[in-house]
Image: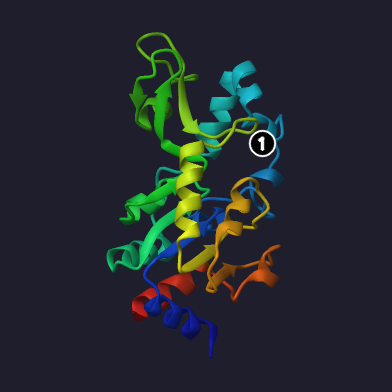
Amino acid sequence: MEAKEQLKKWIKESSRIVFFGGAGVSTESGIPDFRSVDGLYNQKYKYPPETIISHGFYLKNPEEFYRFYKDKMIFRDAKPNRAHLALAKLEDMGKLTAVITQNIDGLHQAAGSRNVLELHGSIHRNYCTRCHKAFGLEAVTDAQGVPKCPCGGTIKPDVVLYEEGLDQHTINQAVQHIRHADMLIIGGTSLTVYPAAGLVNYYQGNKLVLINKSVTPMDSHADLVISGSIGEVLGDVAEAL
């Protein structure tokens, strides 16, 4: 059976699908990933991107951190692509129970997905480090230099930086969804970033699907591997349902 047909058949048979996705889901919306040839890690800055988006650097060099963050981590004009829209449709159909994402761009919600677990936080949530007041994206993007709260505290994005731990409640929710899934679709991720990549090991079913442009360490464990564009694959299958 052709791979997309197999995927469509399994989706029809399933009612507790979980999707686990990474940067490759958003690259088709024009957001660069970190590790591809033209991704952030291959661009030249005064400091390596990994250093700039670390907790220690944020504390020591907030001006440089926000200059990079606003320039390279926020894409206000990005729109959901066919992958995002397909997943929202599967949730509407009562097929998909959760989207677990490593992305911080909020495009799953923009496409209509409701149960989105953001492992690495979101650019759309920001808070004052002093009084904990919540702010939207504009508080950061419209600020000159380091964004400040009226109380004088610094406004920090609710994004997990290097040297920071993931939110335990979000991880626990992700584990529960994956554990109870009757189908797990993984897409657009190299499955090399831990602890996020380790979550897939909680899946106990026999419909593990990998959709990626490059090989991953999990390929040999998958029940179905589809090499290609996540937007094209999910978009075509969702339209055929």
Displayed quadrant of residue 181: bottom left
Q: Quadrant of residue 201?
A: bottom right
| Residue 206 placement (x, y as % from top left) | 55, 74
**Residue 74 visible in this rendered orientation of the protein:** no
SS category of the residue bearing label 1: helix
- What type is the residue that disc 1 sits on? Pro
Of 5 and 183, the residue lying toward us = 183
Q: Is residue 197 left or right of residue 86?
A: right
From the image, which quarter does the C terminus lie in? bottom left
Q: Residue at x 38, y 33 (%)?
A: 137
Residue 99 percent across, percent down from the top left: 43, 56
Q: Which residue is mark 1?
A: 49
* Above/below status of 20 relative to 135: below
Residue drawn at x 57%, y 19% as measured from the top left: 62
Q: x, y (%) of residue 120?
A: 52, 41
Q: Which residue is more in the foreground, 87 or 68?
A: 87
Please indicate, yes or no, whether residue 48 appears anywhere in the rendered image.
Answer: yes
Q: Is residue 147 left or right of residue 190?
A: left
